[in-house]
Amino acid sequence: MTIELIKKSRTWTGTVSYYRHQSEMTSTPMQFSIFIPDGGSSRKKTLLWLSGLTCTEENFITKSGALGKACELDMIIVCPDTSPRGTALKGEHDSYDFGSGAGFYVDATQSPWNANYLMHSYLRDEFVPMIGHHFPINTDAMGISGHSMGGLGALMFGISYPETFKSLSAFAPIVSPIHCPWGHKAFTNYLGENNSNWEQYDPCYLLKERGYNGEILIDQGDSDEFLQEQLKPELLEKIGKEKNIELKIRYQQGYDHSYFFISSFIGEHLEFHHTKLI
Amino acid sequence: MTIELIKKSRTWTGTVSYYRHQSEMTSTPMQFSIFIPDGGSSRKKTLLWLSGLTCTEENFITKSGALGKACELDMIIVCPDTSPRGTALKGEHDSYDFGSGAGFYVDATQSPWNANYLMHSYLRDEFVPMIGHHFPINTDAMGISGHSMGGLGALMFGISYPETFKSLSAFAPIVSPIHCPWGHKAFTNYLGENNSNWEQYDPCYLLKERGYNGEILIDQGDSDEFLQEQLKPELLEKIGKEKNIELKIRYQQGYDHSYFFISSFIGEHLEFHHTKLI
């Protein structure tokens, strides 16, 4: 559980740091960024942010404009990378929606991906305990959010592990990888052809099977270029209604899939998590 | 004066757009980004932002976290690129501190740079009139700010053309290219060996010769890795005192040269410009 500081910068009234550690799960070095507001010796409310396709640990922390609000609320924000790095598997770096930068937060079962692409277990069993060990984070009561593929991850983790994640939100999430081209491509390669092995990672399936005791906040731009083909929030909305889940999907008029959208509403999401986390 | 929209995104209560136009001055296509808050038909208060080494029109608009505050103040922010692009002059792309991404806001006199690297005239005679033509900007009363090499640009333009720029601030500016390695390298290549041709682009020289009627706000991180060798704000501070200029240099404890520093204080700079612009 050794971590190595790569760089740090003072910002607002806190510090952004980038770290590297050798992951036992992925057998690769993994990086993450973390923002910690100044002061206090007790554990702070914390948001785990999962990024989308092509992203690293850097995108959210540099582009979200969230850190001023995080200071105001005295919240930590921690951002893992989206896939293992530094391997050169055949086809790993060929497309933006599969392989490096596109781990989809699943545990691959298919060769050669099953040697390194174990992002689900990495986050749950290695990353979360590690940040609890090194930083003033109560890892039994974190908030989780993310964007697009990371919104998929947030819903997947939030619905599956409510004992760890006490608040849940997402921006423009992929709500059902079983029902979209991004999901089909990645899940076929990582998990094989058998769709029944995909269900444990499909938010729509998970919500239907497990339900959710609490409020889920989702922001979705109605001018998002991926809305109809890939994201399909109406599939989740339908299950939410059937199961009487407190699911609030806000269609934001004119916003697209970019960080210009995320930065516009991240402050409200931080306030949402701050209110839900005790 | 034709401009071509490349892309646009809704953000906060406004729109970020990227444009391209063919510059007569640089003989290249040039890009810029602009944020315009919703509403109103009258001209809005506007900040011209000049970026630093390696940057394009994108860095500030995606990383500054300034757009929420710009909405609150109903201000336009416009960000030109830092050099011509698309040429392949010998040595142009070899280093981060000269050539592409490093135009230094001067008019080159030395071959081969003097064919395209005319960023000073480009901004003054082509860019500013163009944005006044296409957008609700009062180009006789803009604010100007920038970072590092762009802080040099902001001071240079703000002091030289007070009839155009009515408010002036900077983050971690190069205050005297005559007295630092970055300046020596770029100015020797762009302007030749004769230092007397450099003075018109040196904020310390300009402030000493012309003075400044108004307040200048500068934020400078005291943990900035370029502070002692390249930036040297004390040179400007000395002239400010001698000439009785209203120059406020705030040394911000623990902050470095990054956008994490800029984003922490850009809101105060926008408020400064908003107050000064009538």
Image (cartoon, coloured by chain):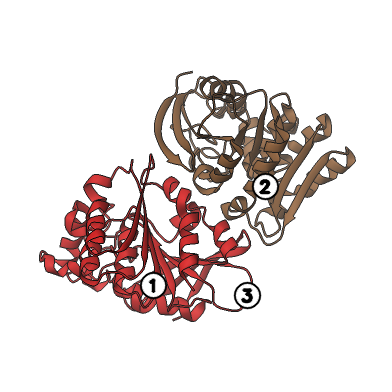
Chain colours: A brown, B red
Q: Quick check: A202 left or right of B118?
A: right
Residue carrying label 1: B165
> Which is more toward the observer, A209 or B141?
B141
Please give the chain letter of the residue carrying mark 2: A
For the residues labelled 1 and 2, the Cα–Cα distance comes to 36 Å
Q: Quick check: B250 left or right of A227?
A: left
Q: Quadrant of the C terminus of chain A?
A: top right
Residue carrying label 3: B40
Tell me whether marks 3 and 1 sit on the same chain.
yes
Mark 1 secondary-structure assignment = strand
Residue B115 locus on image (x, y percent): 24, 73
Residue for point 25% across, 59% down: B241
Identify which amino acid the numbered label 3 is placed on.
Gly
Residue for point 19% across, 62% down: B187
Residue A268: which numbered mark, if any? Answer: 2
Residue B151 locus on image (x, y percent): 33, 59
Mark 2 Cα-neighbour bin, 10 Å: few <14, some 14–19, many ≥20: some
When the figure is inspected, residue A158 is found, relative to residue B54, above or below; the finding is above
Mark 3 secondary-structure assignment = loop
Q: Quick check: A254 left or right of A57?
A: right
Residue A249: which numbered mark, if any? Answer: none
Mark 2 secondary-structure assignment = helix
Mark 1 Cα-neighbour bin, 10 Å: few <14, some 14–19, many ≥20: many
Residue B184 locus on image (x, y percent): 17, 57
Tell us which disc is closer to us: 3 or 1. 1
Asked where in the image residue B113 lies, by quadrant, the reply is bottom left
Identify which amino acid the numbered label 2 is placed on.
Glu
For the residues labelled 2 and 3, the Cα–Cα distance comes to 26 Å
Please give the chain letter of the residue carrying mark 1: B
Question: Along the polypeptide, which appears first: circle 3 or circle 1?
Answer: 3
